[in-house]
Image (cartoon, grey):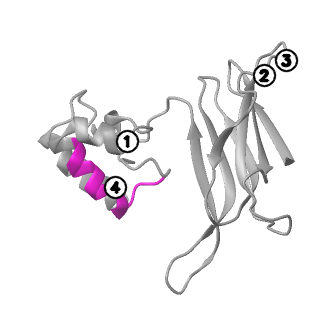
């Protein structure tokens, strides 16, 4: 475990660190980002930790921003493989109940990868829940009327367009 960082989310301390437990060989320097919650009195809520970002590529150097409502955002350098632009980029993972409206695949951003999950959320909420168990269906309520339905389509398109 390397480079730990910590922040207070209003209930617990949220700790994140570079973790090499999934390395295949001793010379494999790829890391994952793991986290744990610790109470104010020092009790570790997640004694084995939980993966925040565990990918086949390298992830490193976490930073945490927590809010007093139990939500933390963990940013880290993540190697992203895209044609012609393989590079490290900053990625963000949410810990807590905060819902980013329009982010249907829970990757921390609203983009074209959210279109298929959005359609699935509209047409089959149960299938969406099965396909994206760590995501919240309320992210599809893009017009904020409390219901996920066809009236959310225009607002979703506006979010995709950056508005």
Query: Which residue lies under the disc numbered 2?
Result: 44
Question: Nearer the observer, disc 4 or disc 1?
Answer: 4
**Mark carried by residue 42:** 3
Name which residue lies at 64% across and 66% down: 57
Q: CA distance from mark 3 to mark 2?
A: 6 Å
Q: Are marks 3 and 2 in contact (CB under 8 Å)?
A: yes
- Helix, strand or loop at label 1? It is loop
| Residue 157 drawn at (x, y percent) | 25, 56
Q: Residues within 10 Å of mark 2 (few under 14, many from 20)?
A: some
Q: Nearer the viewer, residue 6 or 157?
A: 6
Question: Nearer the observer, disc 1 or disc 2?
Answer: 2
| Residue 76 drawn at (x, y percent) | 69, 55
Query: Which residue lies under the disc numbered 4?
Result: 114
Q: Quadrant of residue 59?
A: bottom right
Q: Residue furthest bottom?
A: 84
* Numbered disc total: 4
Question: Nearer the observer, disc 1 or disc 3?
Answer: 3
Q: CA distance from mark 3 to mark 4?
A: 39 Å
Q: CA distance from mark 4 to mark 1?
A: 11 Å
- Helix, strand or loop at label 3? It is loop
Residue range (magenta): 109-121
Q: Are marks 2 and 4 in contact (CB under 8 Å)?
A: no
Q: CA distance from mark 1 to mark 2?
A: 31 Å
Query: Which residue lies under the disc numbered 1?
Result: 101
Name which residue lies at 71% across and 49% down: 33
């Amino acid at each position: 475990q390397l480079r730990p960082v910590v922040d207070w989310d209003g209930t617990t301390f949220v700790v994140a660190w570079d973790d090499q437990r999934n390395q295949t060989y001793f010379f494999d320097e790829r890391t994952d980002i793991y986290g744990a919650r610790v109470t104010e009195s020092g009790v570790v809520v997640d004694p084995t930790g939980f993966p925040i970002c565990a990918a086949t590529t390298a992830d490193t150097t976490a930073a945490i921003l927590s809010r007093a409502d139990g939500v933390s955002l963990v940013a880290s350098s993540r190697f992203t493989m895209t044609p012609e632009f393989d590079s490290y980029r900053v990625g963000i993972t949410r810990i807590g109940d905060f819902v980013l409206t329009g982010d249907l695949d829970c990757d921390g951003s609203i983009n074209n990868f959210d279109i298929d999950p959005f359609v699935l959320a509209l047409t089959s909420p149960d299938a969406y829940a099965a396909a994206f168990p760590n995501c919240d269906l309320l992210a599809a309520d893009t017009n904020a009327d409390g219901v996920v339905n066809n009236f959310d389509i225009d607002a979703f398109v506006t979010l995709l367009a950056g508005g």
